[in-house]
Structure formats: structure tokens, C-alpha cells
Amino acid sequence: CATDKTASATPEPHADSRPCVANYSSSGGFWAGEQIRTFEDFPRASKAIVFDSLVATFVSKGFQIANTNKESGTISTLTGVRFGTTAPVNAVIKSTGANSVRVELILTARGGLIVHTDAAQNLFCELLASVTQRKDESSAAPQPASRETATTTKDKAQKKK
């Protein structure tokens, strides 16, 4: 049975335009490992305040802090993934102007691990949503840690209740 291949795919009507999704990319693959990343620009942000808020969020979500360097704007963490292993999730905070910064998040999965796109995007979006830009700004209360980067259908159903 032939199909009509002339019809072009239309963009999803509810495409997610949040920077954590729009700037999402990955490289590598299942056998070699995968590097997954995103970024978001914060136009009214202090590098030091963003750094402090991200460190607090990583800790509150159950990440193990491996290393931090406020001067260079780097945070290296480990998070639990399937089968009792860990995966590094790193943040790089760069000044992009007098009062603006870019936060880059990078998750590195070793070969043989599958990272679901929605799970990675959800993690990145939660982390970036927690960023405090100024001292007088309070970020939303961090959600409880889900220590797994891949969520199951059962987990999603329980969250909707």
C-alpha cells in the first residue's frame, strides 16, 4: 500500500518555546555515550547570585556536589541514574554583559545508558526555573528530588494525581 509522501509534516501546535527546550541539543549516541545540553540567558542577573541559587537547587534536589568554583562559574555534580550508577550534570555560568549571564547545563551519559529527551528537558527546565537573578528576587521552592533522569509512565501518572 503506497502512502502519500508529498504532505509535509506540520509543526506541533503546542511546541514548547521555553529556552530550556528551545536550546536543547545532544551529541553522541547509545554506544559511545551522549552529551546533552541546554542554555538560558538571564538579562538581569548577577553571576554570583545565579551561582548561589543553582548550588542550593542542586543540593535540594539530591545531587552530589563534586566541585564548585564561584570565580569561574562552574558547578560539577553527580546524579543517580538507573542501575545504581551516577551521571555528571555540570553547570557553567558565564557573564554575557554588565548585568547578564548565560547558564549552560550539560548532562553526560556513559555509553549504554538511554536518556529520554523529556526527562532531560524536564530536569534542565526545573534547574533553570530555580535561578534567582537578583538578591531581592525569590525563586520558586525547589521540587523534591527525583534522582533518576529517566521517568517512567507510572511516575508521570503519580505526579498528575
Image: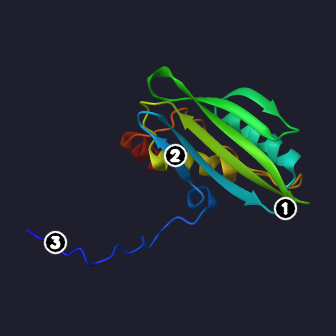
The CA span between labels 3 and 2 is: 32 Å
- The image's mark for residue 94 is none
Amino acid type for the residue under numbered disc 1: Arg
Quadrant assignment, res 123: top right
Amino acid on which disc 3 is placed: Thr
Q: Exactly how many numbered labels are in the figure?
A: 3
**Image location of residue 135, percent across then percent down:** 89, 51
- Is residue 86 left or right of 158 when viewed as pictured? right
Left or right position of 44 against 160: right
> Which residue, given by chain and number where applicable, does mark 1 sit on?
44
Residue extending farthest to the left is: 1
Colouring: rainbow
- Quadrant location, the N terminus: bottom left
Q: Where on the picture, by quarter, is residue 75?
A: top right
Q: Which mark is residue 27?
A: 2
- Tag 2: amino acid: Ser
Q: Earlier in the sequence, mark 3 or mark 2?
A: 3
Q: Nearer the viewer, residue 160 or 131?
A: 131
The residue under the point 49% across, 21% down is: 84
